[in-house]
Image (cartoon, helix red, strand yellow):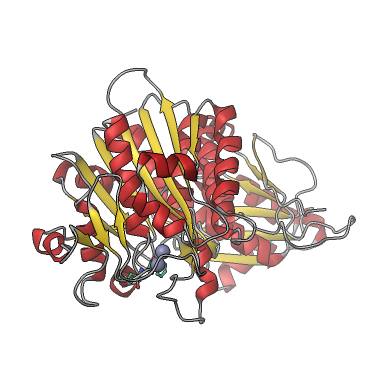
């Protein structure tokens, strides 16, 4: 039996009965609004007294306090939420606030909370995004925890928001959250449970009922097609590689936008083995693929008008007598030969074939790839920013806007011929690593650039730092983040929807 961890969010004029916590918004002047006043009267001035005496609560945005209420109030506790100045509020801030409220409610032991919005001068959309942030933060991965049948929920199960008008804004956001949950679930799965074939099956199971066409290319077909780079990476594993192509035809005509994801279900480094310390985190090396699948799900759930194609290259970079070796020469789908100088630079090899295939078969007008590609991007940007390489300023501007809209942070990195040239091979067309450790993320991008045809607009998102976090963020609990789903959903809907 698995624990039910769902959070049920409801928008209505009045909360459902039985709420244990009343969430009250407080402006800078620390004045109570209607429900706050009511509770204050019932408790003989308990809350106003607290507000007057408690100097550490100022009503500034982000101030959160839990106050235990006298039983006559009908609630166990109140949560006081500072709203600060009205003009400070963006939708991303609303989401972050919702996420923080959720975390503090859960820490306080609340099972059912009511958010009272009376008298708060905020739009319906603001409250929809606040609930969205709470939902995103409420994600839990507990499927491998055994639980007893009568275990009471230890998490927030019900959240009521007294803003009926927010419901219609919330519906599309709930769909995105559903897709983010799916992406996180895949990232959090270990590689003995989620290997290429299993991942491919789950993609089909998730997307086909939503109306997305799914095509799975198995290793025999990959070999026949000449995907020698991806095959090379996957050949050391007992779990053979796959390519999965997903198509959403939102308006029937026109070249699609393409999204390409790195899907290494585990990265041991191969013969160029990684150090033991922290290797367990390499189950997240399919975070790019998870984001692409999540994006397809979000677009389908929201009935996007865009034409979109996704491709994920799935393989395990394993260690065995059959594994590819440093010095092996691989022939990629594009025909370009690659000398393997380090088997740990495997993601770019899988991406090379996925990029070439999608261009040849689907002729997209724009390509965005997502990949947990280099440790070097963590050195440069940490877990906060995703390194973004773009060969087109307009595409970069569109991505930057989507980043501002969603709070998924991007930072532009340089694409330059010097990095591209550095990847030229000596006895082959290309080699799979640069000359030294310096600018490792840039040389990786330079390698990928060899597989972009003509003038196709292309961006490469190195999500090695953002696909997995070790501490909670406002709308992202620790571990698999689902980074990219929110960003690219916004990008597609605003520019191609
Ligand atoms: N999957 C790793 C990159 C990575 C590192 C992801 C840390 C998430 C966290 C990738 O396949 C890799 O090993 N890259 C090498 C490239 C090097 C051999 C040129 C790296 O970054 O060390
Ligand atoms: Zn690697
Ligand atoms: Zn990798």
For the residue pair 83 and 213, the one nearer the viewer reads as: 213
For the residue pair 431 and 277, the one nearer the viewer reads as: 431
Compared across the picture, whether 263 is left or right of 460 comes to right
Q: Position of residue 199 (x, y in %)?
A: 56, 47
- At 62% from the left and 68% from the top, the residue drawn is 50
Task: Determine the residue located farthest toward the left in the rendered image.
Answer: 417
Q: Position of residue 107 (x, y in %)?
A: 67, 67
For the residue pair 88 and 42, the one nearer the viewer reads as: 88
Q: For the image shown, how many numbered marks are present on the structure?
A: 0
Compared across the picture, whether 176 is left or right of 458 comes to right
Quadrant housing residue 382: bottom left
Quadrant housing residue 342: bottom left
Task: Determine the residue located farthest toward the right in the rendered image.
Answer: 150
- At 41% from the left and 44% from the top, the residue drawn is 223
Quadrant housing residue 70: bottom right
Compared across the picture, whether 492 is left or right of 149 comes to left
User: Is there any visible trace of residue 33 in the rendered image?
Assistant: no
User: Is there any visible trace of residue 299 in the rendered image?
Assistant: yes
Compared across the picture, whether 9 is left or right of 431 comes to right
Residue 233 versus residue 296 in the image, above or below: below
Q: Position of residue 173 (x, y in %)?
A: 50, 39
Q: Position of residue 279 (x, y in %)?
A: 51, 74
Quadrant of the rendered image holding ligand 2? bottom left
Q: Quadrant of the C terminus?
A: top left
């Amino acid at each position: 039996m698995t624990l039910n961890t769902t959070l049920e969010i409801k928008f209505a004029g009045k909360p459902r009965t039985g709420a244990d916590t009343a969430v009250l918004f407080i402006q800078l002047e620390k004045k109570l609004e209607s429900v706050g006043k009511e509770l204050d009267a019932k408790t003989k001035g308990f809350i106003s007294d607290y507000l007057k005496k408690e100097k550490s609560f100022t009503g500034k945005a982000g101030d959160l306090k839990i106050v235990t209420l006298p039983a006559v109030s009908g609630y166990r506790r109140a949560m006081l939420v500072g709203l600060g100045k009205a003009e400070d509020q963006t939708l991303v801030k609303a989401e972050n606030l919702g996420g923080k409220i959720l975390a503090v409610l859960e820490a306080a032991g609340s099972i059912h909370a009511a958010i009272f919005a009376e008298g708060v001068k905020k739009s319906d959309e603001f409250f929809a995004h606040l609930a969205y942030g709470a939902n995103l933060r409420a994600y839990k991965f507990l499927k491998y925890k055994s639980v007893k049948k009568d275990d009471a929920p230890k998490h927030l199960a019900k959240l009521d928001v007294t803003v009926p008008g927010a419901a219609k804004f919330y519906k599309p956001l709930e769909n995105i959250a559903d897709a983010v949950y799916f992406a996180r679930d895949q990232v959090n799965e270990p590689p003995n449970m989620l290997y290429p074939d299993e991942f491919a099956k789950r993609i089909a199971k998730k997307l086909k009922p939503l109306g997305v066409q799914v095509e799975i290319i198995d290793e025999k077909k990959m070999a026949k097609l000449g995907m020698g780079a991806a095959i090379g990476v996957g050949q050391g594993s007992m779990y053979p590689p796959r390519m999965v192509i997903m198509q959403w035809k939102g308006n029937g005509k026109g070249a699609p936008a393409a999204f390409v994801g790195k899907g290494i279900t585990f990265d041991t480094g191969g013969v160029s083995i990684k150090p033991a310390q922290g290797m367990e985190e390499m189950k997240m090396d399919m975070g790019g693929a998870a984001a692409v699948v999540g994006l397809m799900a979000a677009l389908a759930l929201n009935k996007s008008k865009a034409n979109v194609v996704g491709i994920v290259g799935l393989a395990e970079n394993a260690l065995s007598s059959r594994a590819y070796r440093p010095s092996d020469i691989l022939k990629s789908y594009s025909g370009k030969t690659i000398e393997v100088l380090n088997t740990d630079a495997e993601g770019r090899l899988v991406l090379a074939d996925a990029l070439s295939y999608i261009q040849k078969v689907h002729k997209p007008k724009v390509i965005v790839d997502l990949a947990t590609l280099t440790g070097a991007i963590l050195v440069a940007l940490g877990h906060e920013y995703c390194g973004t390489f773009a060969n087109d300023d307009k595409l970069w501007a569109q991505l930057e806007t989507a980043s501002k809209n969603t709070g998924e942070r991007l930072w532009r990195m340089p694409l330059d011929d010097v990095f591209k040239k550095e990847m030229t091979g000596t006895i082959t067309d290309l080699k799979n690593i640069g000359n030294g450790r310096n600018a490792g993320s840039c040389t990786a991008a330079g390698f990928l650039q060899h597989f972009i045809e003509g003038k196709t607009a292309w961006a490469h998102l190195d999500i090695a730092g953002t696909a997995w976090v070790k501490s909670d963020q406002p709308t992202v609990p620790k571990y698999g983040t689902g980074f990219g789903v929110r960003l690219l959903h916004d990008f597609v809907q605003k520019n191609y929807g």
